[in-house]
Amino acid sequence: MKVAMVVNGTERSGDVEPRVLLADFLRTNLGLTGTHIGCDTTSCGACTVLLDGEPVKSCTLLAVQVEGRQIKTVEGLAQGANLAPIQVGFHEEHGLQCGFCTPGMMLVGAALLERNADPTDEQIRWAISGNICRCTGYMNIVKAIRHAAQLQAAARMAPAAEAAAAVTGGEE
């Protein structure tokens, strides 16, 4: 069966049996190994990807179910050589831990920040509650997502500051 979808902004397709899971299609057919398979039951969240911008567990979703839809994996977060704010946050706040849960945590964090630019720690904890960190490093993951929110807020303010500096000639 032929399946086609847009993965990380690029049209991708492949021939799959109807029983092939999205996680397996991404890893095996497309070579996107950042999507991890942990529990095969949607409990751990290591397989989380964004489907049309919403976090989903790809270990129990069939590849044919996402025909024509938009998928973002952890490989799609960076813009060329520039890390996404969520990736910078995980690096700066040591949220990476062993790294197995990291792709799913980053995608859930990125989706949260799309909906809520300034989440509270409680809202961050709720957002990541469907993902398990076996290193039990949730504190640094929460800090990482908060750090990413601050980076995004600073980026939103930068153009205004640059415009103000242009008007005043850089003098305050």
Image (tube, helix red, strand yellow):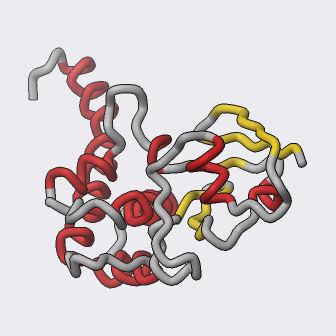
Comparing 61 with 40, the one in front is 40
Figure quadrant of residue 140: bottom left
Query: Looking at the image, which residue is at 46% across and 61% down?
Result: 36
Instruction: Say if 92 sits above or below 83 in the image.
Output: below
Q: Position of residue 148 (x, y in %)?
A: 29, 55
Which quadrant, please, contains the C terminus? top left
Looking at the image, can residue 28 be seen? yes
Give the number of callouts.
0
Q: Residue at x 90, y 48 (%)?
A: 1
**In-front residue for pair 115/63:** 63
One can see residue 112 in this view: no
| Residue located 20% across and 65% down the image | 97
Q: Of all residues shown, which one is farthest toward the top? A: 169
Rendering coords of residue 93 (x, y %)? 15, 59
| Residue 64 location (% of width, % of height) | 82, 57
Q: Quadrant of residue 79?
A: top left
Q: Nearer the viewer, residue 95 or 118?
A: 95
What residue occupies the far right of the structure in this picture?
1
Residue 96 rendering spot, x and y as whole percentages: 23, 60
Quarter of the rendering containing residue 136: bottom left
Horizontal relation, residue 97 to residue 47: left or right: left
Q: Residue at x 32, y 47 (%)?
A: 85
